[in-house]
Amino acid sequence: MFHYTVETNQSIGESMTVLEEKLKEEKFGVLWHFDIKETLQNKGFEFDQPYHVLEVCNPKEAQRVLSENQMVGYFLPCKIVVYEDGGKTKIGMPRPTSLIEMVSDSSIKGFAQDIEDRLIACIDRVVQ
């Protein structure tokens, strides 16, 4: 699958607070928080589903991978989404290992796997 998604009974707000704490532990910062519901409603569009996109980055790792292959910048920063679906909060992301396949550079597959593992661990710690 191209994505990793988990489900929790926690609220979106609680999930995002814990997620940001866990990301900091792995040296990832939230560069941007895009509240899609709020943005669309402010533009006059109906959208009642809470849906948040967090763009996250670990500067050291970004520098490392961009030094190897600048095409990876097309996928940076990493995205994590937090949204409501069927009364549950879902947290998910596109898998860096799936995205990196589009670059066709086997030398950075290990890097993508490391980032993916670390981000999944952060997400999993939210629902524990």
Image (cartoon, rainbow, N blue to C red):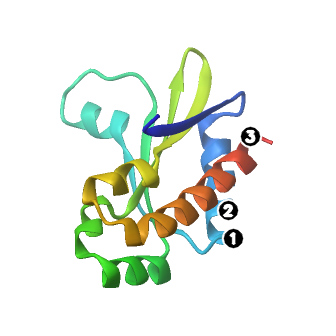
Mark 1 lies on residue? 25
Q: Position of residue 29 (x, y in %)?
A: 52, 69
Mark 3 lies on residue? 127
Amino acid type at image mark 1: Glu
Q: Position of residue 90 (x, y in %)?
A: 57, 32
Identify the mark nearer the N-term, 3 or 2.
2
Nearer to me, 108 or 128: 108
Residue depicted at x 28% and y 31%: 41
Does dot 2 land on a helix, a strand or a loop? helix
State how far apart marks 3 and 2 are (Cα). Answer: 13 Å
Please tell me the numbered disc located at residue 115: none
Amino acid type at image mark 3: Val
Q: Are the two marked residues, 1 and 3, in contact with CB atoms closer than 8 angstroms?
A: no
32 shown above or below 82: below
3 left or right, relative to 67: right
Q: Residues within 10 Å of mark 2 (few under 14, many from 20)?
A: some
State how far apart marks 1 and 3 are (Cα). Answer: 16 Å
Instruction: Quadrant for residue 47, please give it.
Output: top left
Q: Are the two marked residues, 1 and 2, in contact with CB atoms closer than 8 angstroms?
A: yes
Q: Position of residue 98 (x, y in %)?
A: 40, 48
Q: Residues within 10 Å of mark 3 (few under 14, many from 20)?
A: some
Amino acid type at image mark 2: Glu
40 shown above or below 78: above
Nearer to me, 117 or 19: 117
Nearer to me, 8 or 45: 8
Q: Residues within 10 Å of mark 1 (few under 14, many from 20)?
A: few
Please tell me the numbered disc located at residue 21: 2
Q: Position of residue 65 (x, y in %)?
A: 39, 77
